[in-house]
Image: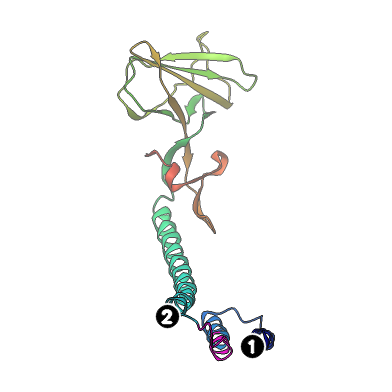
Amino acid sequence: MAIAATTNESLDNTVTGVNAKNNTSQDLQNNFLTLLVAQLKNQDPTNPMQNNELTTQLAQINTVQGIEKLNTTLGSISGQINSNQSLQATALIGHGVMVPGSNILVGSKDGKVSTTPFGLELERAADTVTATITDATGKAVRTIDIGGLTAGVHSFTWDGSLSDGTTAPDGAYTVAINAKGNGEQLVARSLHFGMVNGVIRGSDGAKLDLGLAGSATLEDVRQIL
């Protein structure tokens, strides 16, 4: 019992002498070895530490060092990926892209109407596809029968004409896609147009500045026009 008491007291003194603020891998290794040497010096002679116990404790510090090195490596890789994404994204400046969304903008100049493209993405081929365009009040102003389409991304341009034969006033409109195949309702994601004005680089990667269309990641881009 006297030996056990002496061991505990010595270990307590050793632990107290370790600087708790040290947190680098070298500090962790030094602290670990200090504690291990103290433990070996003060171990109970009648019950000494076994080889497998010593091996386990030595492996622990290697694990800590390995994790720290891995975190450093992953951080470096992440930074390189973000840099590469930014470089790739700058190549899109000045180009139009189709990204998930449902907005259509209508404008006119000198009596000529122009609209931003809209699109859709199909997971499966569709027998029938319709696009319903609504105005800012939610009123349906035009339904376009697109017909059958293959799976994938498709883009279209609305001429701005309404169901009553008139021309759509300037403003923002919304498109909704309905697709069916083999008598079943299909998943169809609507896409809208954005002009890439610049690149925004953040901690979560590069984003495309699409002006009025908001922002999007490179992964959001379904088509480059």
User: Which image quarter: residue 130?
Assistant: top left
Q: Amino acid at mark 1?
A: Ile
Question: 10 Å neighbourhood of mark 2: few (<14), some, or many (≥20)?
Answer: few
Q: Amino acid at mark 2?
A: Asn
Residue 58 in picture, x, y percent from top left = 46, 79
Question: Which of the pair 179/22 is nearer the observer?
Answer: 22
Disc 1 secondary structure class: helix
Q: Which residues are magenta?
A: 36-48
Residue 38 in picture, x, y percent from top left = 58, 89
Left or right: 16 as drawn, with respect to 65: right
Relative to 205, say whether 219 is above or below. above
Q: Residue at x 47, y 66 (%)?
A: 75
* Quadrant holding the N terminus: bottom right
Residue 148 in picture, x, y percent from top left = 32, 16
Question: 10 Å neighbourhood of mark 1: few (<14), some, or many (≥20)?
Answer: few
Q: Residue at x 44, y 58 (%)?
A: 86
The stretch drawn in magenta includes residue 38: yes
Q: Disc 2 designates what residue?
A: 51
Circle 2 or circle 1, nearest the eye: 1
Q: Give the distance between the C-alpha atoms of the residues marked 2 and 1, in whole angstroms.
A: 21 Å
* Quadrant holding the C terminus: top left
Relative to 164, say whether 221 is above or below. below
Left or right: 192 as drawn, with respect to 18: left
Relative to 94, say whether 22 is above or below. below
Q: Disc 1 designates what residue?
A: 3
Q: Residue at x 48, y 68 (%)?
A: 71
